[in-house]
Image (cartoon, grey):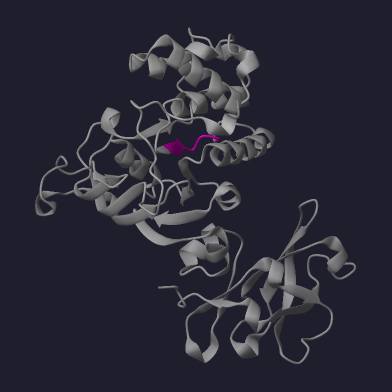
Amino acid sequence: MNPGTLQPDRQAPLQQPGDRAVIELEKVSRRFGGQSSGQSSGQLGGQFAVEELSLSIGPGEFFSLLGPSGSGKSTTLRLIAGFEHPDGGRIRLQGLDLTGAPPHRRPVNMVFQNYALFPHLDVWDNVAFGPRSQRLAAPQIRRRVGEILEVVRLSELARRRPHELSGGQQQRVALARALVNAPAALLLDEPLGALDPDLRRVMRAELQRIQRELGITFLLVTHDREEALSLSDRLAVLHQGRLEQVGTPRQLYDRPCSAVVATFLGATNLLPDGSAGGLRLLRPERLRLSETPPQQGECGLRAQVRELAFQGATVEVRLAGRDGLAGRDGLALIAIDTSANLPENLRVGSELWCRWNHADTHRLADCPP
């Protein structure tokens, strides 16, 4: 049996091929602290947790919602799952308007950070809980559970209970339990947050492998930019309940639309844009430190080293600009490079040149349509 061929029975919702979005949000809003949902927006008070959010997520896509605490990520996930109801807008799943439908009527399943496993049941029975709730025949249950345990590589641990498993193994049980009924989309709410850093890296690779094998749409909520950048086909950055930007990891990292997106996706140099006004983004890995001034065609300014942070393969250097004539005296700068590429005897207090190519910068106002 090929674990990549796991298929739902007729009772389970099927993910349809083609270009139709699996998840569509159309101007979805949710307020907290006011009157209950379902009333007109003119009657509602409180604060927006999500404000007029529109998104479209396709079949088989690994999509992430990225943002700080309070940005509306988890609320969005709960709205899609049916645990919250919007105060405005529409939610469509596989083309059907399911805005007011209860969770059990929606073709999605959710995985939580705390796993929510039944402690008195072994791995097999935890995973079999969903098919049994659907009153499937015993042979169907055995096939489904056996296939998904093979996919998550837990077949040999089927008779262990949750307390006998590692954190990563428990997370894979939670994934298997959510996937066994072949949902159209899997919703993951900070699923790796309880794991230590090394195990998180391992589980990132496992998530990606499982998603590719099954071809199911994954929607991940996270505040970890490394997680979102490494896993996602596309991602959306949320800030204070509003969508800042959506695109591929490379698009958002190299060409963010705003300082919010730029700084949330990594260390950032924001440079004055001269007579044009506004700001230009220069990523720290594009900033070169040198004892010699810029060459023809390069940009640059003098700066003083304020901090050095050894990070193993790289060194982070924080500097303050000394180019007072250009109006940039005291400008905070960050350079990240390998020790081999940095000037010798670099230390706090050193003065040197910061050099970069204009083509490596991006004007923050230049947003894609």
Quadrant of the rendering where the C terminus is positioned? bottom left
* In this rendering, position of residue 44 left or right of residue 284: left
144 horizontally vs 132: left or right: right
Q: Residue at x 78, y 89 (%)?
A: 295
Answer left or right for 21 relative to 67. Answer: left
Residue nearer the viewer, 59 or 328: 59
Q: From this viewpoint, is residue 253 visible? A: yes
In the rendered structure, the answer to whether residue 114 lies left or right of residue 369 reads right
Where's residue 54, x and y in %?
Answer: 31, 56
Q: How many marks?
A: 0
Residue 167 in view of the camera: no
Magenta includes 189?
Answer: yes
Magenta stretch contains residue 206: no
Q: Which quadrant of the figure contains the N terminus?
A: top right
When the figure is inspected, residue 224 is found, relative to residue 289, above or below; the finding is above
| Residue 180 location (% of width, % of height) | 46, 25
Q: Residue at x 33, y 25 (%)?
A: 11
Image quarter of residue 243:
bottom left
Report the span colored magenta: 186-192
Residue pictured at 47% horizontal, 78% vertical: 366
Residue 49 image point, x, y percent: 30, 48
Position of residue 260 relative to residue 144, above or below, is below
